[in-house]
Amino acid sequence: MAPENKSLRSIHTIDQNASVCIIILCGPGQNEILLTKRTTYNGHHSGQVSLPGGKEEPNDTSLVQTAIRESYEEIGIILSLENFLGKLTPLYVPLSQIMVHPFVFYYPFTEKIHFNLDNQEVDYILYCSLKALQDKNLVRKKKISIDNYSFTIPYYAIEGETVWGATAMILSEFIEILRRIERKNTGISF
């Protein structure tokens, strides 16, 4: 799911670490992940679909704690280390010069979840079931332009939105893990 323009994937400088969460919502008859639609602002990732998360701060005791704190600040969901499932491969984002560390959590619920969105960062939440996420028809390609560069990007079409870049690459690894779990006939179904 990496863009075809290789200059966008080269490492120049890592200015900071950030953490994001793939949150699996586990409720009655459903298993889905949530994504956030960023608000429009003056920056590289304005209006994009992303995973909850953000930059590491000096008071964070670990990168997983960064993920937990940022998810609470952005969407008002309280994650727990007891619901932590694991870490995916860190990913460098050249446009913002950040190394992103993805973490996977499950969030069990029995009633409708009430989110408290930070309106300066999150416009709204999107959902995608784990089963739908594995549908190869979600993967598409289109041309985009950023900073006078035009290139073709692969993306996931989820709820009418374009999910591309680092978020798509992280989801791609997560989807491959889901497929391997199902292929091993673990009895876990999505």
Image (tube, rainbow, N blue to C red):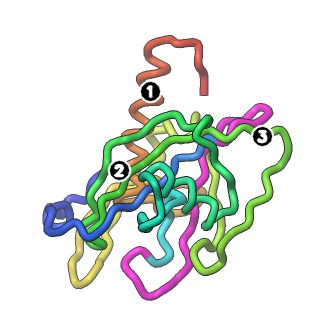
- Magenta segment range? 25-45
Q: Secondary structure at mark 2?
A: helix
Q: Tell me the crowding category of disc 2: few under 14, some 14 to 19, or many 20 or more residues within 10 angstroms, Cα based.
A: many
Does 27 lie within the magenta span? yes
Sequence-wise, the earlier of marks 1 and 2 is 2
Three-letter amino acid code at the position of disc 1: Arg
Please give the name of the residue rendered at 56% of the width and 53% of the height, measured from the top-left corner: 68
Q: How many marks?
A: 3
SS label for mark 1: helix
Tag on residue 169?
A: 2
* Numbered disc in front, either 3 or 1: 3
* Placement of 34 over or under 118, stated as above or below: above
**In this rendering, which labeled residue sits more in front, label 2 or label 3?**
3
Q: Name which of mark 3 and mark 1 comes first in the sequence.
A: 3
Residue 129 visible here: no
Residue tagged by mark 3?
Answer: 109
Q: Name the kind of residue labelled 2 in the image.
A: Met
Residue at 46% over, 78% down:
46
Question: In the depicted view, which residue is nearer to us: 190 or 86?
Answer: 86
Q: Which mark is residue 179?
A: 1
Q: Amino acid at mark 3?
A: Phe
Whole-percent x, y for residue 23 in the image? 58, 46
Report the front residue among 167 and 144: 167
Residue lying farthest bottom? Answer: 42
Q: Quadrant of the C terminus?
A: top right
Mark 1 is surrounded, within 10 Å at the Cα level, by few (under 14), some (14 to 19) or many (20 or more) other residues, namely: some
**Label 2 vs label 3: CA separation?**
28 Å
